[in-house]
Image (cartoon, rainbow, N blue to C red):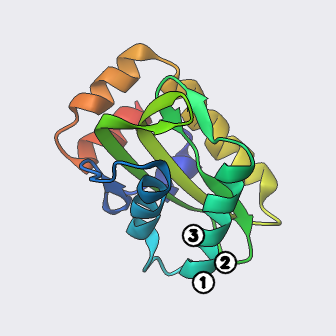
Amino acid sequence: MSSSTAQILQPSQISLDIAATGKNEAILEVAGIVRNNPDMLSFGTFCEELVARDELRSTAAGYGVAFPHARTDAVREIVIAAGRIKAGVLFGEERVHFIFVIGTPREKVAEYLVAVGTLARLLRKEKVRATLMGAATPEEFVRVLGA
């Protein structure tokens, strides 16, 4: 993972036991991890924009991974939260096990594309996803992404 993405996604921003069983519920549960992030300006607006974006077009990216995101004025800097759902949750026809919620200021498009691109390339690898599925701690989850 790029150093900038590694700096953004910290162990405190990861939940390995998302309980939600529905898509929107899962997106909001993962988003809740960054509710008190100092760069969050309006959590309610952020959540509304995340759900609206996913309703417009599914943020499932294949391989059991989704990237619900919003380019928004509700965050000061890029924020990322990650959640793992062992049983998975349906995003349309796709069962998703890993949700990476991303909020980015409207003017930081390039940085957003680097973060998502880096995560997407890593998560295409079956070995990476299998190791993330078995990660026992958020710290281990981050280490796998940083490898």
Residue 30 pos. (x, y %): 41, 58
Q: In which quarter of the image is residue 60?
A: top right
Q: Nearer the viewer, residue 42 or 139?
A: 42
Which of marks 2 and 3 precedes in the sequence? Answer: 3
Q: Quadrant of residue 103?
A: bottom right
Q: Which residue is drawn at 54% across and 28% down?
A: 93
Residue 35 pos. (x, y %): 45, 76
Badge 2 density bin: few <14, some 14–19, many ≥20, Cα 10 Å: many
Question: Does the rendering let one see residue 107?
Answer: yes
Badge 1 density bin: few <14, some 14–19, many ≥20, Cα 10 Å: some
Dot 2 amino acid type: Ala
Q: Disc 2 marks which residue?
A: 74
Q: Nearer the viewer, residue 73 or 87?
A: 87
Residue 128 pos. (x, y %): 39, 23
User: Helix, strand or loop at disc 2?
Assistant: loop
Q: Disc 1 marks which residue?
A: 42
Residue 3 pos. (x, y %): 54, 46
User: Helix, strand or loop at disc 3?
Assistant: helix
Question: Which residue is outermost to the top?
Answer: 126
Q: Disc 3 marks which residue?
A: 47
Q: Residue at x 56, y 40 (%)?
A: 2
User: Helix, strand or loop at disc 1?
Assistant: loop
Question: Which residue is outermost to the left?
Answer: 136
- Are the residues flagged by discs 2 and 1 in contact, CB closer than 8 Å? yes
Q: In this view, does 19 lie to the left or right of 68?
A: left
* Distance from the alpha carbon under mark 2 to that under mark 1: 5 Å
Q: Residue at x 74, y 77 (%)?
A: 73
Dot 1 amino acid type: Ser
* Distance from the alpha carbon under mark 3 to that under mark 2: 9 Å
Disc number for residue 145: none
